[in-house]
Image (tube, helix red, strand yellow):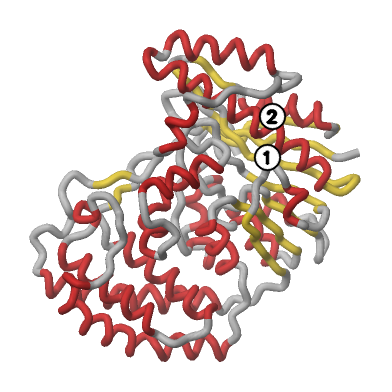
Amino acid sequence: MNPQQQNSYLTHRANAGAGRHGWLRLTPAYSVRLVRERTGHLPAGAVVTDPFSGTGTTILAAAEHGCDGRAVDVNPFLVWLGNAKAARYPAALLAETRASVPVMAAHAAAWTAEAPVLWAPNLHNIDRWWSPGSLAALKGLRRALDEVCLPAPALDLLGIAFCRTAIAVSNAAFNHQSMSLRTAPASATADAADDCAGVIRRFAAETAGVLTSAEAALPGAGRVIQGDARDLDAGGLPPCDLLLTSPPYVNRMSYIRELRPYMYWLRFLDRASDAGELDWTAIGGTWGIATSRLNGWAPDGTVAPIDGELREVCTLIARDGGKNGPLLATYVTKYFHDMSAHFATAFRHVKTGGQATYIIGNSTFYGHVVPAERWYSSLLRATGFTDVRTSVLRKRNSNLALYEYEVTGRRP
């Protein structure tokens, strides 16, 4: 591995063809290859905890290795997704789910004639996301999902296939770090009837792929609970042998923003204000109302031992960032106050002799580097971890001094 290269196999790209790991794409997700390397030495039954579950990469890889994967996330959609990925699916349930697909497809096709009166999510500018025919088909599929009588685990698998279909036929673009929309709808000139039929066929194909990957046996177990990484004590988690995670980077990327098409269609969100409220509860969240609330936030203490350097960097960001500078300086300050609270609860959660491993990137604001990896190291030591080490994993951007690091510490 050359840390001066971008090493895409250490990113979400490694997950695309890795069975359940590839069910839904989230660009900030980290590589299952990296997780497997970090858990490969653990004995069967070892407890691996991820306080920032995300798409569930850690707990699924732990379960595949025969470990007990535990995770926490504030986002109920990600709790659902992680649990669906790490669940065991009996052959009889998979057969029942397969048998339901032709019936669902027929019902969905019939329902598309009623598309104007069918429920659709309250997603802003939804017509920019899907062509009229694709949107009609998704409405029909959503209605068919609501009507099908299957056990909850089967509905989870169908929900995954629905999400995969919705994003595949959308105008979403992934040519940047964050999800964006194409300028012109990809299917604007397509015949609506053909469009509908194609989306329903796509759903059937996606379901077949999801069910095939769900057949894989998991020698271990994995579970995600909804909770706050700043208070792991409240979750009732068992002490862990390895805490392995990739927290949100201090770069203002909103997980809610990246997940909104899935979250709206699966009814985890209804209004834009709901998204902002949820993002405010997340470390590093700044979407919607979370941004405006930053203006009124003030620290209730210091972040020893990095407080002096943190204030120095944030003063420069506020000075050089124009009208947004003070807001972003507050964002960086709040991020490290929140992470300081997390490290304290993480130390209590790791077993004596256990290890904590954080995959984190640095960031820049108006030319000023926020050395997250160095500040993580300092905060781990201040919390009580020993043998704290930092190594470079990869270069994240060919033009900027942005790197991804691994920061580890051991509980004595």
Residue 210, numbered label? none
Residue at horizontal 37 percent and vertical 15 percent from the top: 323
- Any part of residue 59 in sight: yes
Look at label 2 and name its amino acid.
Answer: Tyr
Q: Secondary structure at mark 1?
A: strand
Residue 358, numbered label? 1
Residue at horizontal 36 percent and vertical 63 percent from the top: 265
State left or right for residue 140 relative to residue 5.
left
Q: Quadrant of the N terminus?
A: top right
Near-viewer residue (130 or 377)? 130
Residue at horizontal 17 percent and vertical 77 percent from the top: 114
Whether residue 11 is situated above or below residue 389 in the rendered picture: below
Look at label 1 and name its amino acid.
Answer: Tyr
Q: Name the residue tied to disc 2.
A: 376
Q: Residues within 10 Å of mark 2 (few under 14, many from 20)?
A: many
Q: Secondary structure at mark 2?
A: helix
Quadrant assignment, res 175: top left
